[in-house]
Amino acid sequence: MTTKPTTPEKGNTSSSDLGVFDTHALMSLLFTKARPHLNREELAWIAGGTDVAVFHARNLANTMTTIGCMTNQDEGNWMEDSESVSKLLFGLAHQTHVIAELVEMAESARCWLRG
């Protein structure tokens, strides 16, 4: 069973040996189950996912830079609201996990294509 963090707003719990439901666990499970049935063309399509991951990583970096600049000039003191800050950080962490999963899947597909 995996020990991935739960999201506080959902209170997710684990079910049998699947672990906590999150995007990483779902994508990993589906990819593992689908892998034996994928042809070379489909694997090549998945291997191209690194381009998508790079795009999203750069977009996330730009978003975080903007948030940093806004925080630096925070006249409304929104950073004092711990609920808002935690939701923001959980969202950013989730996006980072999804990007990492895209890279892992693309690299796995690339390895399988090499044989």
Image: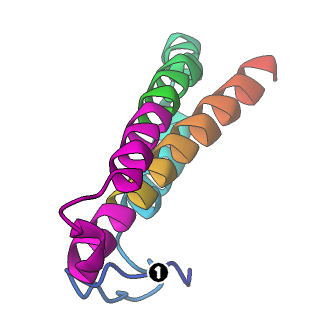
User: Which residue occupies 45% across, 63% down?
Assistant: 25
Q: Where is residue 101 in the image (x, y as percent from the top left)?
A: 54, 46
Residue 71 in view, yes or no: yes
Quadrant in the rendering for residue 18? bottom left
According to the picture, the residue beneath numbered tag 1 turns out to be 5
- Residue 29 vs 5, above or below: the answer is above
User: Which residue occupies 38% across, 65% down?
Assistant: 89
The amino acid type, in three-letter code, at marker 1 is Pro
Q: In which quarter of the image is the N terminus?
A: bottom right
Task: Please report the bounds of the magenta region as a residue range.
Answer: 61-90
Camera-side residue of 72 and 109: 72
Quadrant in the rendering for residue 86? bottom left
- Residue 11 vs 95, above or below: the answer is below
Q: Position of residue 113 (x, y in %)?
A: 72, 19
Query: Secondary structure of the magenta portion, mostly?
Result: helix
Q: Is residue 33 magenta?
A: no
47 left or right of 52 in image: right
Q: Where is residue 37 in the image (x, y as percent from the top left)?
A: 49, 33
Q: Residues within 10 Å of mark 1 (few under 14, many from 20)?
A: few
